[in-house]
Image (tube, grey):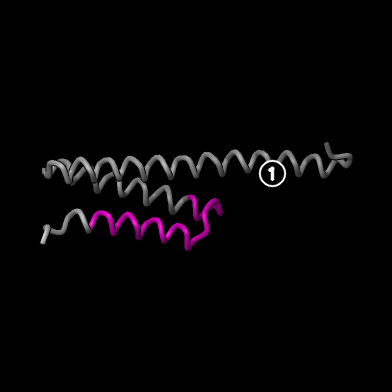
Amino acid sequence: MANIKSAAKRAQIAERNRLRNKAYRSAVRTLIKNFLNAVSEYSAEPTPEKLAEVHRRMSLAYSKIDKAVKRGVLHRNTGARRKARLTRILNKTLQPAV
């Protein structure tokens, strides 16, 4: 435990920020997982409704990634990489099998 009052306050702030960052990271992972599940459902049985759901979930994941980057939870390159991976997965699914 910290002996100095300001050090104790900083430890308290660091813990608060750690929990907030953890919540953002968890939310990003959950939304990415939801997107991947929607893509797999669409690839199994392609319908316009499922495609709309895929795009909706992709939008939600993009939004949460951007918010995490804005708040400093994720580095901007990490956010860009994750969004690019989602786009690549979607494009691979949408292209007809050759």
Indicate the position of residue 81 as horizontal and vertical percent values.
Answer: 41, 60
Relative to 43, 12 lies left or right: right
How busy is the neighbourhood of tag 1: few (under 14 within 10 Å), some, or many (20 plus)? few
Three-letter code for the amino acid on which mark 1 is drawn: Ala
Q: Is residue 90 above or below residue 28?
A: below
Q: Which residue is mark 1?
A: 14
Q: Is 87 included in the stretch rendered in magenta? A: yes
| Prevailing secondary structure class for the magenta stretch in the rendered image | helix
Relative to 20, 45 lies left or right: left
Residue under the point 47% across and 63% down: 77
The C terminus, quarter of image:
bottom left
Q: How many marks?
A: 1
Q: Is residue 38 above or below residue 88?
A: above
Relative to 95, 36 lies left or right: right
Could you say which is closer to the camera, residue 15 or residue 85? 85
Residue at the extreme right: 3
Magenta span of residues: 68-91
Tell me the element at label 1.
Answer: helix
